Amino acid sequence: MPRNRFVSDDRDKKIEQLEEELFLARMAIVDLMPEQLRAVLTANFYCESRELLHEWLRWSVEQIIDAADKRPGHEMGDYPGSGQRAYCPLCGSEASSPYTRGFAFPTGLIRHLEGSHSQQQCSVFRAVERMARDRLRGLEAGGPRIRWSSPRVPPWRVPPPAPTERPAPPTRPSAEIVQLRKE
Ligand SMILES: [Zn+2]
């Protein structure tokens, strides 16, 4: 029936608008992050398969953990000799403990980022993970893909640079050695 078709068209258009707004809101969250972490989060655009998504999730958690400002436990309200603790470098939050600051490092922080072990997931990482999953679902449903002008390799698949060779020790000019021997 034509009337229903119009209603349905209207609703589709509204959904499309809301999806666009959601995307922009999620990108605004990413834009608020420090530059180093922004690069890690925006790398979710490489997730064009389930495999890439899982690789990105693993790699990005590692990168975020690396970026955390970890401190000795006793500086964070824990007892002396306890492990290190850190605030979440994305959302700045901490475990809900009245005595200690930050999360136990790295386990507590990893659980916060992943939302595992019945931890509430980091709001920033959740937004970006949802963005990646939504985009992948769209691709799997035949949605548009980014066409790179040249082949791109996800940053986590770029092989690490070869260890630089040790520079050879400077050689003394032979004339100087002759001189030393004379003395
Ligand atoms: Zn967080």
Image (tube, rainbow, N blue to C red):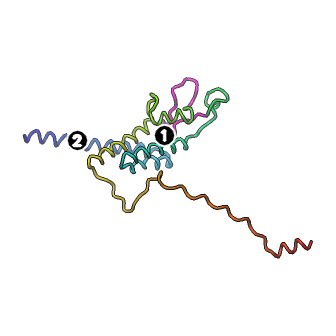
Label 1 beta carbon less than 8 Å to ligand 1: yes
Direction from residue 15 to residue 112 in the image, left or right: right
Label drawn at residue 14: 2
In which quadrant will I find the N terminus?
A: top left
Residue 98 position within the rendered picture, expressed as x and y whole percent measured from the top left = 55, 23
Compared to residue 119, the image places residue 31 above or below, namely below
Residue at 47% from the left image edge and 43% from the top image edge: 58
Task: Judge whether residue 122 is colored magenta.
Answer: no
Asked if 162 appears above or below 73 in the picture, the reply is below
Start-end of magenta stretch: 84-101
* Front one among 50 and 104: 50
SS of the residue under disc 2 = helix
- Looking at this rendering, what residue extends furthest in the bottom direction? 175
Give whichever of 113, 166 is nearer the camera: 166
Residue at 70 percent across and 65 percent down: it is 168
On residue 90, which mark appears? 1
Q: Which amino acid, by three-letter code, is at mark 1?
A: Leu
> Is residue 167 shown left or right of residue 67?
right
Q: Residues within 10 Å of mark 2 (few under 14, many from 20)?
A: few
